[in-house]
Image (tube, helix red, strand yellow):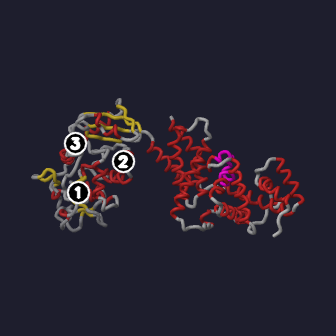
Amino acid sequence: MEDTAFDTVVTTHHGEIFRYLRRLSWRLGEADDLSQETFLRAYRAWAGLAPDANVRAWLFTIATNVYRNHVRSERRRYAAHATVRTTRRELELDGPEEEAMAGEMKTLTEAAIRRLPLKQRLAFTLRKLHELDYEAIGQSIECSPESARAHVFQALRKIRTTLNGHVQPLRESTR
Amino acid sequence: MTSKPRVCVAIEPDLVAAATGEAEAPAAERVETHVASCPSCRDDFARYRAIDSAVGALRATAPPPGDADTARERLIARLADLRPRILGYRVFPSSLGPILIARSEHGVALVEYLPREGVSASRLFRMAGVEAREDRGDLERLERELLEYLDGRRRQLNWPLDFRGARSEFERAVLEATAAVPYGAVSSYTGIAGEIGKPSAVRAVAQALRHNPLPIVVPCHRIVGASGDLIGYAGDRLSLKEQLLGLEGVPTQPSHASKIARRALYHYEPNPSREYCLPTCGDIARRPIGLLFSRREQAEARGLVPCTTCHPELHPLPE
């Protein structure tokens, strides 16, 4: 019976957790492996989860931990790789002509997100791309909700600075 | 660069919040009033709005659906492997001694020559993540078919198999390659190693077959040493291997029952034109065994063609 319930967890949340890890990771295969790891860990911990727990936030916490461990081991492996390069190909963005400008902005923003320090990048992604509340984000990255909010705001400031000069401000008329 | 007026510095956090949908109503109002009269902050506000809108576009961009599907399918398969499996089992007497068969909802998972100590010593009870239940009749058909096979009245056991008892991908590959050796044919550990693309893993192949969870069905009795010796079967029960091969009409040497009579079999070793040979073709009968057939039809059923040098079709071996 437990197993059927976990099947429902997979059906309901796998897509979103995969997207989250896909956003964080550089290669497609990476997201595949990391989402496997996330759900296998979740499966092992499933029996001990409180019945009224927020399963979605819990999965994001596990996924975030899995990703952070992964980054740590990757860092050890590629300690020399300090610079991060982003190409259009990696971002897989190919908007139609009329959306080229917006597409450009999207690409630049995505690249700017990738350059954020890890905690800010996680907090920002969880908040702005997956719309989690600060309580859940704090849980995921092991800090208070207030610090989580501060990370998101720092991230926004940093993105703005990175994009300065590249981006035309969005005027009221184009909103 | 001139420093910002204090009022602008003070309102900055609210400005970021308001532009990105994070502000409460009073803060948003304060920001609105301020930017109306401060061109520099209005510009800032507009830049954050632009970022917010780009982020919204990113949020709406889903990865190609196929990627997530592949990942999910892999995950579901992994989870299925982890789950406790319920295996129904049945024990019955046979000409080879008492046999235990167990199956899951996916297929037959275990065939075992019971140890002398009886059912309680079965490896079924040592398999990880398995819950064993005595069968109440579902396995009767399998029992009947296996007994027919051992009587020589049946040549194939077309059972769905559950290979999850295999301990690794390698072991699974060995079992699958072994399952493809047809009735009445013989291969060698070297032959199987070559078949799965690991020609140097001969010992590992022998190890994997020693742990074969499905003897008879996955015919590890058809796998012999490179020179035709019947080495190793069900621990030390070599006579079972002889009996099973005898049943299939595979000849052993008259003076030496635990050695295949290679001179009485057709030979095949992998070659581009897929030709099979008489045992007298060159030195083929002295080289490591690839695949041996007791009848020509068996070779041809596998898509092999007669050798154009020795012409097995013109000089068939005596039946």
* Residue position for label 2: B166
Viewer-proximal residue among A28 and A77: A77
Q: Is the magenta stretch mostly helix, strand or loop?
A: helix
How many neighbours does mark 2 have within 10 angstroms: few (below 14), some (14-19), or many (20 or more)? some
Judge if badges 3 and 1 mark residues of a common chain. yes
Image-based side of B113 in relation to A70, left or right: left
**Disc 3 + disc 1, Cβ < 8 Å:** no
Q: What's the amino acid at mark 2?
A: Ala
Residue position for label 3: B152
First-in-chain label (3 vs 2): 3
- Residue at mark 1: B292
Q: Is residue B314 visible in this depiction of the protein?
A: no
Residue B153: image quadrant is top left
Give yes or no for contact between labels 1 and 2 (Cβ–Cβ under 8 Å): no
State which tag comes first along the sequence, 1 or 2.
Answer: 2
Instruction: Look at the numbered disc 3 and give the secondary structure of its residue.
Output: loop
Which amino acid, by three-letter code, is at mark 1?
Leu
Task: Check if mark 3 and mark 2 are on a common chain.
Answer: yes
Rate crowding at label 3 as few (under 14), some (14 to 19) or many (20 or more) other CA atoms within 10 Å.
few
- The magenta stretch spans which residues? A124-138
Q: Residue A96 location, x and y as percent?
A: 69, 64
Residue B245, position as x, y percentages in the image: 20, 48
